[in-house]
Image (spheres, grey):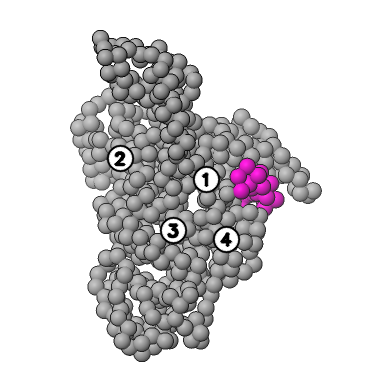
Amino acid sequence: MQIQNNNNLFNKISQKDVAMGATQKAGEEAQESAKPQYENEVVTSDVVSAYFNVKKAENKQTPQYENNLRTKFQENKAVIYALIPRTFNAQDKDGNELIGANEQKGTFLNAIDRLDELKSYGVNALHILPCYEPNTEQAMGTAGSIYSVADFLQLDSHLDDKADPRTVDEEFKQFTDECHKRGISVMIDIPGCAGIELYNDRPELMAKNPDGTPKIPQGWQDIRMFEVWEDKDKQKLNQALVDYHKQIVDKYMDLGVDGFRVDVARSKPTKFWVDVISHARAKNPECAFLAESYTYEDASPMANVAADRPEDLLKAGFDSYYGQYHIFHEWPTAQEFHDNMILNLEMSKNLPGAKSLIGSFATHDDKSPMTHGGADYCNLTTGLQETLPMTNPYFVSGFETGDEYKYDYTHKTNIAMPLNAETRDKLNKAFSEFDKVSNKDLNVFITDTKTNTDCNKFTAHASQIDIFNASTKPQGDHPEIGTFMTDMAKIREKYEDVITKGSYIPLQTTNKQDKVIAYARHLNGKTLLIIANKDTNGTQSANINIKGLKAEQQMVDIAPKNAGDATVESKEDNISVKLSPAKFMMFEIDTPDIEKSGVKVYKQQNI
């Protein structure tokens, strides 16, 4: 009878263990707190000792995680999902798209609940958008812009689960540990500027104009530029800023972070990044660095910020960069699509080691892909980035369900009132109708929660994911996009060598509007043929020249179901196609000598 309820005791101690860690202190507290509540329940030191012996055995059996994020980038095997912790799994119950006082906010701990979902999409790396303590002075939005940071060495206190006894740092470590158990690497964002509070607290880090006023990036009110140089003429860096970034690297690597995405990487010289990246690689050679840098245009031209220079950044130690996919919807022809891919492949010849792109068809800085052609366009971009060379697929939270990022509260003023959800909803609808029919614009939004900043306005950028407010979990009405992602991930895995290592062969078509994208991926005698209609509004037809193709070739589309109908007919050395808008197709064809057929062949170097 003495040990009849030891299972109950183990459960009690286990709960303590989760909260406190498997330490001697936890063991001592477990002995104290797990006192008998039943006649036949006896707590002995033997029980506690047995429990911790079991835990030690379990820990020995669990393979130790080893960071391999840099290798993933080098081998084009990262599949990245970008998320904002405060919204990623936030639960909006009253339907106003904001997280109120009695609703479940996003935290590091409840983000764990969605990791298996992400894994099902093929995701093996996370880009955690800034999750530091946000600036609240001259703020944009009621929660503060995630890119306006009060202190890079403090995680956002609002991400702390108040029901859990651990600190927010410990909860973040639990999150990274759970990612690693699933083979998911974690990359955290380092913004290129500081919030006003950091500007005031650490003046030695900050840049000023000759008249003593702060340097401010064009178009922003809540951030300030860092001072990179102590003496620019002598090329002497501001060591205080270098050291601050090394502290950032140290802290988050110790919390399980595998790499860093660097915001506006061009805002600091390569000399700066050589120093910081070398420091990180001394701690772990697999620490990866992703540069927000574009191929040939300055995506966000602004005063006080240098132009893009991806080659220099990659030579300084960055492993991957953004490329140019974010303007895919602006390219009028398939040739421009090919030219961009060729430009990057040719650039790889000048780079040390294997460097890669991310599939930046949409980032948090861009409008929802839904605005460019709905779910069919989303699936088109997924199909392309899952099959292009030198490319690591990249998705932003909400993409998987087609979120259009339309928020009813955008640019309205928050008025917090102790009203029930039904009354608030009726008032907000009435105010909205009044705005439509009157010449006056009340532009107010009733909530039950006061702003966390000195800003009462719900700042938001049209059709972009909200980075300014405590908004709801990003989600749309098109789960078929996530299904397509899942199925394409399986295809990518099946043909991994051809997709990640194979050559890129642009194929000529007869389409007069040049809207039909066609290319082959080839490796060791195996050929994949990809065909897509770039036109999201109209059907397109074309003949596609493929030297070595036999008329009897069976054309079996291996792409997941998407868009509308298509017809494909194989002929000697070519095929004819008719594609519905945004149609994506993929075939395995028997053309072992296609690279020797006189076509132009492009290859990524050092892969």
Write the start and end of the magenta stretch as one range: 266-285
Callout 3 amino acid: Pro
Q: Amino acid at mark 2?
A: Glu
Residue at the image point whose x is 31% and y is 86% from the top: 552
Q: CA distance from mark 2 to mark 4?
A: 40 Å
- Which residue is tagged 3? 393
Amino acid type at mark 4: Lys
| 3 or 4: tag closer to the N-terminus | 4
- Does label 3 or label 1 sit earlier along the sequence? 1
Which callout, 1 or 4, points at the residue further toward the start of the chain? 1
Name above or below for residue 531 compared with residue 299.
below
Which mark's residue is nearer the viewer, 2 or 1?
A: 1
Answer few, some or many: residues within 10 Å of disc 4's Cα (few below 14, many 20 plus, some between 14 and 19): many
User: What amino acid does circle 1 point to?
Assistant: Glu
Q: Which residue is mark 4?
A: 355
Mark 2 or mark 4: which is in front? 4
- Name the residue at the top extreme: 39
Task: Please report the residue visible at 42 percent of the width from the left and 72 percent of the height from the top.
Answer: 332
Element at label 3: strand
6 vs 64, nearest the viewer: 6
Q: Nearer the viewer, residue 10 or 416?
A: 10
Which residue is label 2 attached to?
A: 97
Q: Are marks 3 and 1 in contact (CB under 8 Å)?
A: no
| Residue lying furthest front | 1
**What separation in Å lies between label 1 and label 4 (alpha carbons)?**
21 Å
The spot of residue 411 in percent (x, y) is 37, 42
Q: Quick check: is 276 in the magenta stretch? A: yes
Foreground disc of the pair 1, 4: 1
Residue sitting farthest toward the right? 234
> Which label belongs to residue 66?
1
